[in-house]
Amino acid sequence: MNKKADLFMPMFVLTSFIVLALLFYTISSTNAKRNDLIGASSIALIKVYDEGEKVLYYIDKSSHMSFDSAYNRIANNGGYYSSDDCDQINGYLIINHCKEDFNPYENFKKLFSEDMNSYLKVYKSSYNEFKPEDITLSSTFNFFGFIPDEVKPDDEYSYKSLLEKPVNNLQISSFDFKDNELNVLYSDVKFHVEPVKSSPLASSYYTIHPKFSVDIDDFEIYNRLYASIAVNCINKNHESCNNILVSSFSNIEFEQVGNIIKLTLPLKYSTIRMAFDNSKPLKQLDLFKSSQ
């Protein structure tokens, strides 16, 4: 009886060891081939959604700042893109002393786009990439093959950089102005879901559709003011010019310095400031005369 017991125990231990070893090998091999950890893919989806919301907020705030800057510069420049090619008097651009064409709406879009691009180019993501080593006992799991080793890419090719590039390169798709509202549409931004393990860049992605809307004064008032000056004020009696402008534009203010007349026109969302020399013609005069 004792001999059988003595023989059984070693055999039982050996058999148990073999079974456990095979079980351990099967489990470790299976886990080593897994592309992600349990629940990690769901976490990655939540994280990329959060990143998208942060980007939308960043684009919206950048759009507001770009709009404020561009819109005020256009108003202060009397509708012109820049003051560099115009003569000035006390900070007022003399519109018939400017080399460039008068095109307030296109000039605004150009200024807005430039300012917006300057914000987009410096966008940096705060995304925290998935790190298996942060998991409790991950070093032990790595040792036994539950979490395979992986090679970390350079920062330039990291997942975080892949989130930043679509924002850095974001394009404006369209400007739409209607009923005193400006709508700016941007190109879609696609964020691939972070690959949790050694899988290629995930086929799942999250797409955002950035846009920006703001109330705005009708840009047509610039053209109306310019046309009225061209037809009614150039080489015309100063008092007659003033009377016509006052009847057409409420709250307009004048200040005359020799042949130069400075105008200030308060609007709902901005104040147009410009000056003109009533002894010199304005560009596109024939066009405005034909449209009267």
Image: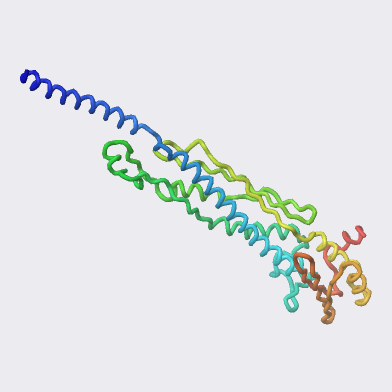
Q: How many circles with numbers are drawn on the protein?
A: 0
Can you give x and y, in whole percent of width and height, for residue 34 in the image?
A: 38, 33
Q: Nearer the viewer, residue 220 or 289?
A: 220
Residue 149, placed above or below residue 66: above
Q: In percent of the image, x 68 and y 58: which residue is there?
A: 110
Can you give x and y, in whole percent of width and height, for residue 61 in the image?
A: 61, 58
Q: In percent of the image, x 55 and y 56: which residue is there?
A: 121
Q: Nearer the viewer, residue 180 or 259?
A: 180
Q: Nearer the viewer, residue 181 or 155?
A: 181
Q: Is residue 20 left or right of residue 281?
A: left
Image quarter of the C terminus: bottom right
Residue 7, placed above or below residue 130: above
Residue 160 in view of the camera: yes
Can you give x and y, in whole percent of width and height, for residue 162 in the image?
A: 49, 47
Residue 198 in view of the camera: no
Image quarter of the N terminus: top left
Residue 231, placed above or below residue 190: below
Q: Residue furthest bottom?
A: 258
Q: Is residue 34 left or right of residue 15?
A: right
Residue 284, placed above or below residue 125: below
